[in-house]
Image (cartoon, helix red, strand yellow):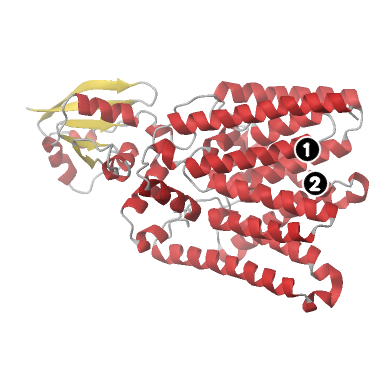
Amino acid sequence: MQNIKTRFIANIIFFCLIYALMFYVVARAVSLVMTHDEAYSFYNVKHFWYVETLCTGNTHWFNFLAIKASVLLGLEKASQLRWFSVFSAGVFLTSAYFWIKSLKDFPTKFFAFAIALLNPFLIDYLGLARGYAAGLMFESLALICVSIAIKNNKRNMATLSLFFAGMAAIANFNFFYFFAAFSIIYFYRFHLKQGLEFIKQKLFYIEWIYALAIAWLVLRALKFMTECSNDIGDYGGEELVTSVFAGMIDTHIYGKFHTNALQLLAYLFFVVVFGTSLYGILAFKKHKIVWYRLSSSLLLLMFALMIINKWCFDVLYPTYRTCLILYPLIALVLVGFVSSIVTTKKIKAVMLYVFSAIMAIHFITTINFSKTFDYYQQEDSKLCFDYLKSIGAKKVGLTGELYGVYRNYYQMTEQYKYPFAAEQLNTQVVLRDNYDAHKIKEYEYLVLFPPYNMSFYRNQGIHLKGMKYFGRTGTLVMRVITQ
């Protein structure tokens, strides 16, 4: 057990580290150009039609309202539109700080910091104008409040935790798995476990109506999306391990390594998470860590709900960004397991320091202020558009990777519109007719993204001259010269 002075110094160190991460999130939110999905959210705010807005899984409701508030104030820079995500990131990181502060020894604190926060993919979404940061914020608040309620027998904190769990589901529909699992455990722990007395309690009916209202609202919205566009139906995977765990590993290594062992690592990760979760539940009398048992129960119940959803309704498993709901719980489970099972101080310290140092070094190698894992295609978009403006371009054919941010963001803004007109090129598939190919002659410039497919220019009586190459993404500006 650390003495008071040692614990104080350790807490200061992690306070500084966590808010250095917060500074990094803010810096990225300011410096990153607008990304594809953020641009579509902005478009729906500026060009609002309730059918189109509610028809897509891209509309995260709290994020939509935050962008709307920013637009009403005339704040349309990408960094300004991200204000709610940055605020949510601050709450999420602060929640992580108080959790890390509660841990007993420095090696465990360092491990918790590394496993929970030194994930470049997580950092990406803490600074983007999407609903993931808000979902993570509400999830962390729900976990903190219910842990306090159980440990200190504070009933009002329990009710607050249910409220936050519901808000997580509203912030991002992917978090409905968390809300559903949380509600099952919540009503068992705070109502059904007490016997039939809960029938006489007014609070039970209030909380029950609240939970049903959240469930109805989310499921109704998902049903509308499915019938309208099936926008969310194709994103996911067919198998639990290869979808969830392979996706989590791939995003965590952040494209830095290419490994053929991804599937093997995914199954190994699954076994570790499943085993440590089971231990958290079955060995509670031994470890007595409330948040460890709670997170273990939530995690296994969420996996069960995913399996039921797939088997009964053919809903695909979460993968990549939709797995962000699992990161806090997996971190809690792994740290809880290490805290309870490894008792030899020297072995524990060496093991945790080595593992944490590897994660920290990897995270440092991913630090950048210009790109994200999911939206790397837009890294040079503004530079490209600025270049086209500088050379006086009038009509441009844009690759699809850049057309979305041009149409949905820049040309919808009051202050940042570009003077040239642009249309989307289809460079990825074989065209059924020659409409686009003939239309190439109408463009002054083409903007292409690798892999370049120039086949449909053949025999069109034009010559293409390279004008500008953007090395970070491979974006290429070409001038169309009619022969």
In percent of width and height, residue 384 lies at 29, 28
Q: Which residue appears at 91% of the width and 30% of the height?
A: 1
Name the side, left or right, on which 435 lies relative to 160. Answer: left
Going by the numbered disc 1, the residue's amino acid type is Val
Q: Tag 1: Cα neighbours inside 10 Å, few (<14), some, or many (≥20)?
A: many
The residue at which mark 1 appears reads as 335
From this view, report whether residue 346 is shown above or below residue 327: above
Give whichever of 181, 289 is nearer the camera.
289
What distance separates the C-alpha of mark 1 from that of mark 2? 8 Å
Q: Which residue appears at 36% of the width and 59% of the height?
A: 52
Give whichever of 67, 5 is nearer the camera.
5
In the rendered structure, are the residues bearing label 1 and label 2 in contact, judged by CB atoms less than 8 Å apart? yes
User: Can residue 84 be seen at all in this image of the molecule?
Assistant: yes
In percent of width and height, residue 238 lies at 57, 52
The residue at which mark 2 appears reads as 292
Which quadrant would the C terminus be assigned to in this image? top left
- Kind of element beneath mark 2: helix
Going by the numbered disc 2, the residue's amino acid type is Tyr
- Kind of element beneath mark 1: helix
Q: Which residue appears at 46% of the width and 41% of the height?
A: 82
From this view, report whether residue 185 is shown above or below residue 11: below
Q: Which residue appears at 60% of the width and 60% of the height?
A: 310
Q: Which dot marks residue 5?
A: none
